Amino acid sequence: MNRTDFLETDALLDEEDRAIGEAVRSYANAELAPHVAEWYESGTIPIDIAIGLGKLGVLGMHLEGYGCAGTTATAYGVACRELEAIDSGLRSLVSVQGSLAMFAIHRWGTEEHRQEWLPRMAAGEAIGCFGLTEADAGSDPGSMRTHARRDGDDWILSGSKMWITNGTVAHVAVVWAQTDDGIRGFAVPTDTPGFSAHEIHRKLSLRASVTAELVLDDVRLPASAVFPDVRGLKGPLSCLNEARYGILWGAVGAARACLEEALEYTLVRTQFGKPLASFQLTQRKLADMSIAVTNASLTAIQLGRLKDQRRITPEHVSHGKLANVKVALEVARTARGMLGAAGITLDHTVMRHMNNLETVSTYEGTEEMHALSIGRALTGIAAFR
């Protein structure tokens, strides 16, 4: 019996999807896991790991052409699961690169944008970021203040973006801005005069990840920089839906890692002359955690099937993100308690996962916004305003 895949849910995956998951797990355990506690403690991550991830084939892996692997959506989800089993920051790097920046360029950019950026981004040679969120426009992106105006054939961008993963290491930023023609997207090379990025420090969560504020001070761009065929929030929300899909898989990996460590620890840690795992209260916690991880895995696999069948809806993704992150947080918190004082150190993974999941619960749509999305689907009534 696989004690952390109690109902053998991986048997529901296609053989190729399982093989991709095993390859990512092996790479992540060998190349990333030994260093992640140090990266977390130092509050940084070496961006050159993107080259290895590119060789592994996980950057934009679910996209077609331009050096991308063109895998199933389920395979991409399994890869996210294995990366987040190590750390949410690793999955976040891959999600922002592939499901936000690369997807935006692939879906909404021009052919010139695709040819210029996607092959290098798939290889990890160029990093992308996604500029949507602002300090005063999080759950309500339509109220963004960043704007772009025409000046002859050029565009002039002004404003700022906040909480931007990969911001200070990116070579290209996908920036969304208000225009006289609605919200538009732009491919902005980060070496353009007037563009700057400032790293956000003193984070207590998602520390093995680069987070930044982007400042656009009259950034002049040619007419070719704009995404030609999308107006309004349709563009950025389509990208967020891709990223949220990866998150709901990633949460399974974080929860599974916490269950694994809690089980291993309680089997060897003794109190009152016997292992902690022999106590009834401990076994009940382990049973509840196992059920939670299994249910989250089943949710992710079903949503992967729906996405591969092109039947998935944003509300489906909201269900998965809300449910899976919520249970992953509960599993992480329970595991942290089961490890006692040891659980607060970086010698173990559980509190690092717990802290990271606090951020994962908030970004790409808060718990409240996803609940309202599901509520609208059930009732036909929008309660956002």
Image (tube, rainbow, N blue to C red):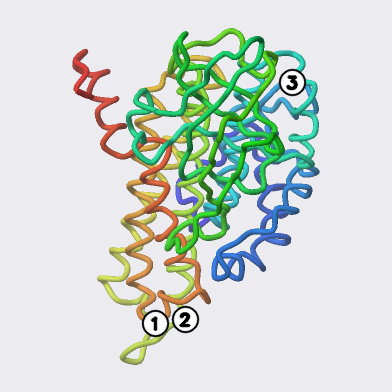
Residue drawn 45% across and 23% down?
A: 237
Instruction: Please tell me which of labels 2 and 3 falls first in the chain.
Output: 3
Residue drawn 71% across and 55% down?
A: 26
SS at badge 2: helix
Instruction: Please tell me which of labels 2 and 1 falls first in the chain.
Output: 2
Task: Count residues near mark 1 (Cα–Cα under 10 Å), then give few for <14, some for 14-19, many for 20+.
Answer: some
Determine whether 149 is above or below 29 in the image: above
Count the numbered circles shown: 3
Disc 2 residue type (three-letter): Val
Determine whether 166 is above or below 106 in the image: below
Indicate which label's residue lies in the foreground, 3 or 1: 3
Residue drawn 61% across and 64% down?
A: 36
* Residue of label 3: 114
Pick the front one: 301 or 135: 135
* Residue of label 2: 268
Pick the front one: 351 or 232: 232
Q: For residue 217, which quarter of the picture?
A: top right
Q: Which mark is residue 275?
A: 1
Asked if marks 2 and 1 touch (Cβ < 8 Å), the reply is: yes
Disc 3 residue type (three-letter): Arg
Q: Is residue 100 left or right of residue 286?
A: right
Pick the front one: 196 or 139: 196
At which x and y percent is residue 230? Answer: 53, 10
SS at badge 3: helix
Q: CA distance from mark 2 to mark 3?
A: 53 Å
Asked if marks 2 and 3 touch (Cβ < 8 Å), the reply is: no
